[in-house]
Amino acid sequence: MGEIVKETEIQWMKPGASITVSILGKDIAVVASKNMINFIEISRPEKKELLYHANSEVRGDGVQCICTHKTLPCFAFAEMCRNPRILVVSYPSFEVFKSFDSVTDTNYIALKFSEMEYLVALTGVPDYKIVIWNWRTAEKVHVQETKLRNPNQFLSISPTSPIQIVQSTNTDREIFFWNMSVCYKKILFNKVHQSLPETSTPPYCFCFGADGELYFVDSEGSLYMVNADTKSVVLQLSCQSPKKDNYVPCLVWYKGGLVLSTPSKVQFWRRKSPEGWALIWTYETKTPFAKLLSSSLRDHLLGVTIWNDVMLFKGETQIDCVLIREYAGDFEFINFIHPVGDYFITFGNTRRLFTIWNKIQGQMTSSLAWSKKRINSMKSNPKRPYSVVVTEDGRTNIINTYDPNYIMELDEVPLTRNSLHEIRFANQGILFCVANREIGEFFMLRLPAKIDVVAYLKIDLKIVDYALNETDDNKLNLLIVPMSQMCCRSGHNLMIYAYIDKLKVFEYVKDIVMPWVTTCIAPSTVSSDLLFCVPHRSRQVDLLNINTGKVMEKA
């Protein structure tokens, strides 16, 4: 049995936001993202999913690309690191029973199982080799140089013998067909090169039928068939819908026919004669799909949207899409929810959706749609479970995250006709300051009893950065770096204002001329006299004493 990951174990993550979805066996959806692989039972998505963490020498160093076997309970993935290995893992025991040493020092960009015992991989920059292993014996049986130099390549493998490997990109009109024959443990490779006419658009997604026939859709959504003997391309269905910016062509073999996506619909077609196709059903898409998948052993049809939502198609003629998992993208802002920090909140202006996530399980617990103006910044209170957002129309909103399973908007206050850009909290979380950095407009607000504006300041200068600094005698200072350089947002002056609670005003204290041009500041949590500063075009962090104006040390 694979190593059990305890909930208290700290996990690290690989950078990136994309996910890869495959189907394993009859009923398992496999969702891979960087160093985590989720296994979801399609017919019972509410059941707790199994997790595989590729974050160690034994389990692998991240997931660059992954493939599943159609009939056997196993999957393979290439690591996301230098000199990546390829690991073959059993399901559900998660035993790594085969490991292949790297043939490249960069990365793999595609990985596929054949219906026999072969595993086919495509390396990335600079060589783009096709490498074939016998995954049962761990023998590397063939390495093939290719002439297709493009990082956005993909592979397709025929379900019948002899094995045919299709290599192509979505930017070129060239298709490479590699015919692979096995004779007494010898591999015979034969290449056929096909160039599409200049009038056609590049192929985007390939799909093999049950009998080995090959289809593809182009970047405009038209369907083509490749002649098995001559490799010539024949148009089958022409897409009449106007192309949209977020359209991704998709194609998959399903129930003896083809399911393809057009710019506005998903359609299921069956061939009724050698010359014609019959439309079985149409589904109007609300969110464009980025990938379609089907199970060859059970009639499951899955779709993955451009927002990484995994959807299950249901019905025979009246089709409905059921959400089985959300793996939201479009994160512009991400903050941990305090004081515990077991959950974090995200937001993106494209999808306009707040989401709360469990950091241990990696699952979304709740979401909230946003219908107001664009959000420019979001910050979580360091002591209490709520977040503050500021908008382009000068409003400040409070988002309640006390219950991770129910996110809600708590309060709103319109402050100015100007846009608001930044938020800074005091250490205790009761006071916070929002600002417009283009005109130097600052509002001090107080929570949690009731949101209230307690002080206002306008200096009519562009702002590089600002911070709230609590002194040892419980006084609060506003530290401001005004912009002094024309080439970039940076400055060499530090302005200090004291917040006078009784008078509800900011009172000017002094200016400090810093010894360097600064792009960012942050108060020290060790001493209220110290300020971290990031000099312009520097890899170091300097420490400034704001009482004396002297540089303390380099961090």
Image: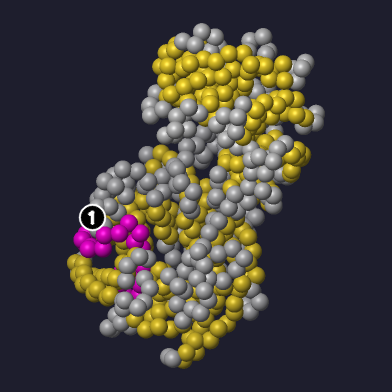
**Could you tell me which residue is drawn at 75 percent across and 29 percent down?**
453
**Could you tell me which residue is drawn at 60 percent across and 68 percent down?**
285
279 with respect to 543 (left or right): right
Question: Which percent across, then down, holds residue 501?
Answer: 74, 17
Secondary structure beneath label 1 = loop
Tell me if residue 371 is in the magenta stretch: no
Q: Quadrant of the C terminus?
A: top left
Question: Which percent across, then down, holds residue 400?
Answer: 73, 39
Tell me if residue 156 is in the magenta stretch: yes
Q: Visible in this render: residue 302?
A: yes
Amino acid beneath label 1: Asp
In front here: 85 or 521?
521
Image position of 258 with respect to 246: above or below:
below
Residues in magenta? 140-165
Residue found at the far front of this picture = 460
**Could you tell me which residue is drawn at 53 percent across and 19 percent down?**
494
223 with respect to 499 (left or right): left
Question: Which percent across, then down, holds residue 35?
Answer: 45, 45
Q: Quadrant of residue 460?
A: top right
Task: Decide: few, some or many residues near mark 1? Use Cα within 10 Å; few <14, some 14-19, many ≥20.
Answer: some
75 with respect to 278 (left or right): left
In front here: 66 or 471?
471
**Could you tell me which residue is drawn at 53 percent across and 13 percent down?**
546
In front here: 22 or 199?
199
Image position of 268 with respect to 522: above or below:
below
Image position of 292 with respect to 270: above or below:
above
Q: Quadrant of residue 194?
A: bottom left
Residue that carries the numbered disc 1 in the rendered image: 127
Q: Visible in this render: residue 155?
A: no
Q: Quadrant of residue 450?
A: top right
